[in-house]
Amino acid sequence: MTLTVDINRTLGPLPHDDVPSKDETGLVAELERLRIDTACVIHSYAVHGDPRDGNEQLTLIGDRRLCPVPVLVPGPLGTGPWTGGAPLVRLCPRLHGWSVTGPHARVLVAELAESGTTVLLAWDEVTADEVHRLAAATPAPRVVLTGTGYRALRELAELLEAHPSLYVDTSTLCGHRQVEWIAERYGAHRVLFGTGAPVTDDAGPRYLLDTLDLPEADAALIAGGNALRLMGHAP
């Protein structure tokens, strides 16, 4: 049986909407409804409030189907020195007011790369040039770009062509055969199932996953195999 892992999901209340995933019980019910086995979650407080408060909320998660994803901020006003412990983290440089190429960020990125930690990075949080410089660093971290969408496809394709350490999630790859095109050109191992829910729709990416026109082995990688491998749970 293929394991389904949503690499890109949020737990907690949203300031502009009443969502089922405002608490752990509601989020797990949504996962069960859509037949999603595991979700990698940031907490909404880490996005819309203080990242330290959101990361603290993640320590209260009790359901093993939810994988905590801390949000990190470099520098003296950030979340503190990176001590490891999480296979997956999220960076929100534009939202939290720091540069992904600044001196403190370069230290953090190098630490994440050396520890083998995978980074989630939303497309609207950076420019294509910043992604290029991040991926060209030595050592380069593994970065999963989320929320790319059809308007970003030309820049995304150029970046995927140049940097094997870059991956992409399916949250907004909703155009005709976009996922298939990326998987066939750059490898299914570089595409991860992600919904971006509840900020973006989760039923669409779930349906897309069920209808992929790809070999079964490739579809299984996208559904969950790639996420497990990047988090150190699979070869």
Image (cartoon, rainbow, N blue to C red):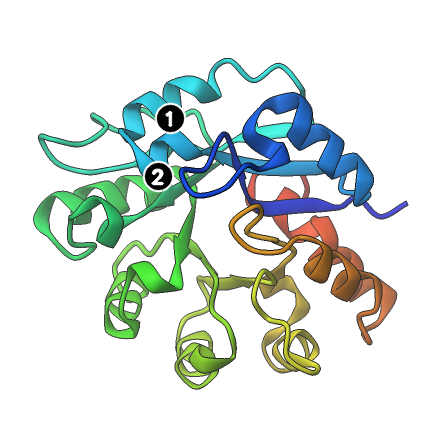
Where residue 187 appears, as percent x and y from the top left, is 64, 72
Q: Tell me the element at label 2.
A: helix
Where residue 79 appears, as percent x and y from the top left, is 23, 28
- The reply to whether callout 2 and callout 1 are in contact (CB within 8 Å) is yes
* Left or right: 194 as drawn, with respect to 14: right
Residue occupying image coordinates x 37% and y 30%: 45
**Which disc is residue 54 wearing?**
1
Residue occupying image coordinates x 43% and y 34%: 44
Q: Quadrant of residue 30?
A: top right
Quadrant holding the C terminus:
top right
Give the CA distance from mark 2 to mark 1.
8 Å
Where residue 157 appears, as percent x and y from the top left, is 47, 81
Quadrant holding the N terminus:
top right
Q: Tell me the element at label 1.
A: helix
Q: Is residue 184 above or below residue 122?
A: below
Q: Is residue 120 above or below residue 216?
A: above
Q: Residue under circle 2?
A: 47
Number of numbered discs on residues: 2
Q: Is residue 29 above or below residue 151?
A: above
Disc nearer the start of the sequence (2/1): 2
Q: Quadrant of residue 185?
A: bottom right
Disc 2 crowd rating (10 Å Cα; few below 14, some 14-19, many 20+) is: many
Q: Is residue 151 above or below residue 201?
A: below
* Left or right: 85 as drawn, with respect to 75: right
Residue occupying image coordinates x 70% and y 77%: 180
Disc 1 crowd rating (10 Å Cα; few below 14, some 14-19, many 20+) is: many
Which amino acid, by three-letter code, is at mark 1? Answer: Gly
Residue occupying the far right of the picture? 1
**Is 11 or 119 nearer to us in this picture?**
11
* Left or right: 89 as drawn, with respect to 136: right
Residue occupying image coordinates x 43% and y 24%: 85
Which amino acid, by three-letter code, is at mark 2? Answer: Val
